[in-house]
Image (tube, grey):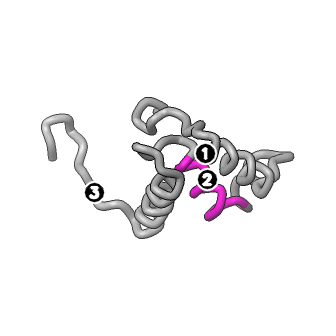
Amino acid sequence: MSESGSETRPLAEGAQRLMREAVQKQQQNGHAQTCVNHWLLALLERHGAMAEALAQGLSAPDLQRYVADQLQRGTIGDPLEQAI
């Protein structure tokens, strides 16, 4: 164990895939860092049906289009470590 009492474990394959997809969104849009909207778009594309089941009235395709448009406009959101 580390001094902080937490262990670093490898990410599960699904989490690694989501991470790669978020980084790909960042690179495709020419942004300097991967931020909340990159992660959100990757998550919605992969798990949109689950998001709809969790949030009544949510339309994953509509939200995907909105977030993709925001990314194209340069609205990337906060870096993930600031959003947590």
- For residue 9, the mark is 3
Mark before the other along the chain sequence, 1 or 3 = 3
Callout 2: helix, strand or loop?
A: helix
- Residue 34 image offset from top left, x and y in percent: 44, 46
Q: Residues within 10 Å of mark 3 (few under 14, many from 20)?
A: few
**Residue 59 magenta-highlighted:** no
Q: Position of residue 36 (x, y in %)?
A: 53, 41
> What residue is at 45 percent from the left and 39 percent from the top?
80
- The mark found on residue 6 in the picture is none
Amino acid type indicated by mark 2: Leu
Q: Residue 41 shows which numbered tag?
A: 2
Q: Is residue 8 above or below residue 20?
A: above
Q: Secondary structure at mark 1?
A: helix
Query: Which percent across, then down, holds residue 71?
Result: 61, 45
Are the residues at dot 1 and dot 2 in contact (C-beta closer than 8 Å)?
Answer: yes
Segment tinted magenta in the rendering: 38-48
Picture quadrant where residue 46 is located: bottom right
